[in-house]
Image: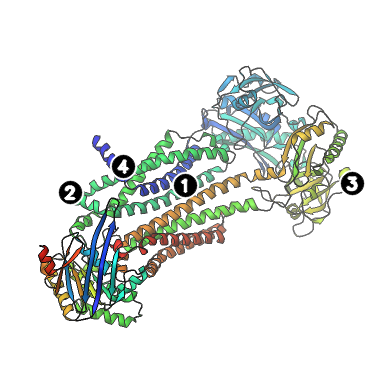
Amino acid sequence: MSNVKIRLEEITKVFVGEEMDTHALKGVNLSIYDGDYISISGQSGCGKSTLLSILGLLDMPTGGKYFIEDHDVSQLTLTQSAEIRNQKIGFIFQQFNLIDELSVFDNIALPLNYSKTSYSQTQIAERVQFCLDKVEMGHRAKHKPNQLSGGQQQRIAIARALVANPAILLVDEPTGNLDSKNGDVVMEMLAKLNEEGTTICMVTHDPRYATMSKTQFHMLDGVLLDAEQARLAG
Amino acid sequence: MIAIANKFRLALVSLKHAPGFCISVLTTLGITIGALICMFNLNHLIYVKSLPYPDHDRLYVAQGESYNKNEMQLDGYHLYPIAELLYKKQDVFEHVSIMHFEEQLITSISGQPKLNVTFTTSGLFTIVDAPMEMGRPIAATEDLDARNPVAVISYKTWNDYYGKRPDILNQKLTVGETSFSIVGVTAKNFSEPELYSIGRKTAVWLAWDFNSIPESNREGWQSWSPSLLVVGKLKKGVTEDQANQQLTQLTNTEFKAQTIGVGWLKEGSIKVRLESFESAIVGDNYKTVMMFLLGALALLLIACANVSNLFLSRTAEKFREYAIRATLGATKAHLFKHVLYETFVLMFLSSMLGLVVAHFGFELLKTHAQEQLPRINDLSINFVTVVFAFSVAALLASFFSVIITNMIKYRRLNSSLQSSGKGSGLQISAKVRSMLILSQVILASLLLTGSFNILKQSLGVINQAAGFETENLVHVIMTTGAQQTTRPERIQMIESIKKKVLELPQVRDISNSIFAPMQTNNFVSLVTKELSGNEKNQANTNMIDHQYVPMFGLELVQGNNFNQENIRDSAKMVLVNETLAKFYAPDGNALGMNVFWQSQPEPYKIVGIVKDIYIPRTGVTSRVYLAGSSSLSFVIKLKDNHDLTKNELIDLVSQVNRNIAIYSFIKVDDAYKTLLARDIAIVSITAAIAVLALFLASLGIYGVLSYSIKLRRYELGVRMSIGACPKRIAKVVFGDYSRPVMLGLLLTMCITILLYAWSLNTDSFAIELIPSMLSYVLVVLTSAIACALSLRQIIWARPITILRGE
């Protein structure tokens, strides 16, 4: 068996409200291995985005344990979380989340600028160009995000997620803002990356794209179900 | 109508959901509109509103001017015979009046208060159409040479000293040895023209014939007085120039005729210049009140910049609502109206608050600036004020609505919902954000630089060393009332009073001298280098004894003080100050030189030179001190931490002579502080403006940075999600915002340098380095704090809350 990249043990997340508390995650257990490509699907409000936020250290769980490459990351400070995000995690958002004022090149170079490892300008340029070529956007380095189509912006977001060689790519509804043609292109790109060895965890509500992953999970009212459990649950 | 009311109701409901925003806007604009209303009213009163007298545009003061050759010697001074000549022989006024302003002890009133008394002819009451509470004004039959002792008292005097007794008419009022019959009380609403000095209110008007000008001065042609005034209502059809010409010819012909053979007046002449009541009352305050208005406008400008940022911030928050409205068919005009209702409600409420602030501002001005600013008692909330306040509200509402509607960018609004997810909502470029910060920093730092410089200048006046001691000193003028005394009798009386006063345990010393140093302009005389010489100097003149110099701590820079023998013999010798010494010997030593008075052939020898002293708002003037005095004026030096009351002194001097009364009892320190009153008022107003400016500047800078950071919230969230730690985010934000802040300061410095270069050529205002630097430091600190406070909410939050916009 491959090495475990990520392990969740009994992860819970409760949102405290004025009138009632919402239990978004109810004891989630999950292991993601090196080279895995998993998808998590489910209806709106089932907790899949909350789970992805916790996986990406954008949010902290209320309970349970979270390990990345056997390091407990359940209770980190903001600064420590930022460092781990920078070194280990690559994010791809539904809304692309590119910074409008920066060029494509500068957007992709951002994670390297935030890294504790010091990169020379040449190294940054080489690395950015490599990633741009990988997503077939090498000719758009000097453009601003608003000069690109949605599909192109998402490809830039993928390049940015890859630039720091993360342990895992966390992908949140990557085709949510794209037409089917551009959606297909992005999904093919993710599949290709996984074939090359990149570990991917994707949240999607589209069953067609969920089937492109190696392992499918289903989220139901805060509980994570594997394919068999999901089938039994109807 | 119902639809409009409904729109306003909806606007109010919408605003109720943003209490923080509403409070910030209302506070910022309420205070600044209030300040603007105050200053607008003051300027309206002074520049626009007519004086409350009939035919006010024909009311003039006939100012006297004295010339030697063509050089003006005195301005605003009259000779007694000239004043009476104008009254009797002029042919340009419909009504004319002469007045003499005095302070007199009213001995018929318990406590013998010293009140402002105006000796006048009947014309004054006709000219200003004085309304009467009861009785009548002084009648024409009681004018010159009628010798009819009648008095008119003010409503305040009637209230304060007579308890509004209804039988006041025909009661007696005693001044000196004359008993006056009260013939009238002016009405409560009578606004007396403050022609002599700002804030001076007459308590009692007395018939002209009984004024206290000595007989010798009434007939003399060398005693000029600033407290003599001739006023009149110009005849219809007579121009100011014609009147000036006629009155000058009338008076100068008489002057020349009466001064034939007076050597030093052989090239002298006089002129009469008409000055309108408006100009005479306002004096040199036109510029001051305009500066206050400009200051208030600058405050409103900075407040508008602040509020614009708050509106931009709110628009950013409401962008989605506007987008939905647009998709439902709202045109640009619909959105403008929607925004206008909301801004109008806010501006209307701000103006209402402004009127309340202005009401309290008027009361503050009436309490603290009555003697510094003209017509202050006429300030009130009136129709013009309300119209002005609501016009400002309407203007600001339109202004903010236009800004907001332009910012919404209608075309982009339509497409924003279709492309949901692309970009970060309201698109305001980094350039616009930087411009907002830049303009805010320039406005704030310029306002602070100006305020701090004015503050420092006024503090400089207050803190300027006087050059003489003021503490533990009392200046006293006594009078023997009706009792006439010869010079030897007075000298005997002076010695007895000195001896008695020195017996008091709290008294350290006593000096028989006429004036305290800060009482300038009370006695000015023309001195020359040679007998009947042409080189003249107008010097403040005092008669002192040998105790005066050490008592006031005046520094002798050359020569000697008078000794007891000099005083006893009234020796023909003088002390002069450094300024006058320079007049006598510009490059050399004035000691031993002779001082001549124009009317006296005997010289006075300079035996000592004392250091110049500084009097607030007067500065340094020539001063000459003669040896010996025979007047009942004293300066009493008290021991530390001891006091002397007027009653103690009255009891004491009555043992010397029962007729002696205390005419004036002034603590020198209090009198000196009174001279500083205007500067203290300016410091207070400026300090208030500076504090308000700092508050607004801080609020503005915080507002613009907070808004700017709010706009970048999503972007910062993205940076955090890809691994930027809090320190890194802070570094990015501080780095980004330090550029426009520093550029703003750099531009302010350039403007300040230009102002500094300009100020070198003018005496009116000086830009200084330290207050300017202080304002820059404060702006940098405020920016850093504002930035840190705004960032705090972001960098210590989980990235997901930022990305979700929670």
Q: Position of residue B349 (x, y in %)?
A: 37, 41
The answer for which chain carries disc 1 is B
> Looking at the image, is mark 1 or mark 3 earlier in the sequence?
1
Q: Nearer the viewer, residue B409 or B270?
A: B409
Q: Nearer the viewer, residue B231 or B269?
A: B231
Neighbour tally class for label 1: few under 14, some 14-19, many 20 plus, Cα within 10 Å: many
Q: Which residue is mark 3?
A: B565
Of circles 4 and 3, which is in front? 4
The answer for which chain carries disc 4 is B
**Marks 1/4: CA–CA distance:** 29 Å
Q: Position of residue B541 (x, y in %)?
A: 76, 44
Residue at point 52% right, 48% down?
B688
Q: Is residue B766 left or right of residue B597?
A: left
Q: Which residue is mark 2?
A: B329
> Looking at the image, is mark 3 or mark 2 earlier in the sequence?
2
Q: Which residue is mark 1?
A: B296
Is residue B530 something one can see in this rendering? no
> Looking at the image, is mark 1 or mark 4 earlier in the sequence?
4
Q: Nearer the viewer, residue B164 or A197?
A: A197
Q: Which residue is mark 4?
A: B12
Q: Check the picture and name the quadrant holding the C terminus of chain B.
A: bottom left
- What label does residue B52 carry, if any? none
